[in-house]
Amino acid sequence: MKFLKYLLFLVLFVLGIALFSALFIPKTYEVKRRVYIELPSDSVFSYVAQLKNQGLYSVWAKMDPHMKVDFEGTDGTVGFLMRWDSPIDSVGAGEQEIVGIEEGKRITYKIRFIRPFESQSDSWMSTRADASGSTEVEWAMTGSMPYPTNLFLVLMDLEGSIGRDLQNGLNNLKGILEQTPTLNPAEEGANAPGNNRES
């Protein structure tokens, strides 16, 4: 009986420490990664502005090649919507919408996760020409987690896990564009997994 009391005390003590620590942990996160692509910035921007093309380089899009993907609107314009649905828990279901475009510089997205849990994140991709003629591409994801769930920002190492996926996606993008610099963005996007379903 004493053992159970000590165990309960230990659990409550650890829980108390965790909740106290969460008071000092940021409730927001921002993860950024970048890559340099040996192509002019206008060519790179025209490719990444097509949301369908993410299916070819995004790590998350490749987790389930058979997931259901639907589109709504005109790709490369504000309001274009991509919805996905997968039975795999790590992929789940949700939607991504283009919510802002700064022509030749930046595309901003709103990502709404539906399953396995509901949440929202903001994301953006930017392109910038450098003096050598190559293009710096930056991909970022931002979001927030209220107290006390913000504790998971540390426990889950979102900076490491999300950052790794962003970087791998950018590396895939670099490989695609530098190997096939004459890609037609619209045509290439049409060949992405699930891109034959559009409304």
Image: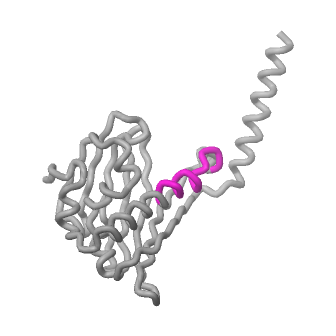
Q: Is 97 positioned to the left or the right of 127 in the image?
A: left
Asked whether residue 81 is drawn in magenta, I would say no
Quarter of the image where one finds residue 40:
bottom left
* In the depicted structure, whether residue 74 falls above or below residue 71: below
* In the depicted structure, whether residue 6 falls above or below residue 100: above
Q: Nearer the viewer, residue 134 or 59?
A: 134
Q: Nearer the viewer, residue 125 or 4?
A: 125
Q: How many marks?
A: 0
Residue 116 at x, y percent in the picture: 42, 37
Numbered range of the magenta stretch: 154-166
Residue 33 at x, y percent in the picture: 51, 66
Q: Residue at x 73, y 35 (%)?
A: 15
Q: Nearer the viewer, residue 167 or 144?
A: 167
Which residue appears farthest toward the front when viewing the image? 179
Q: Residue at x 54, y 62 (%)?
A: 30
Q: Residue at x 31, y 51 (%)?
A: 95
Which residue appears farthest toward the bottom when viewing the image? 131
Residue 168 at x, y percent in the picture: 46, 57
Q: Quadrant of the N terminus?
A: top right
Q: Main secondary structure of the magenta part?
A: helix
Quarter of the image where one finds residue 18:
top right
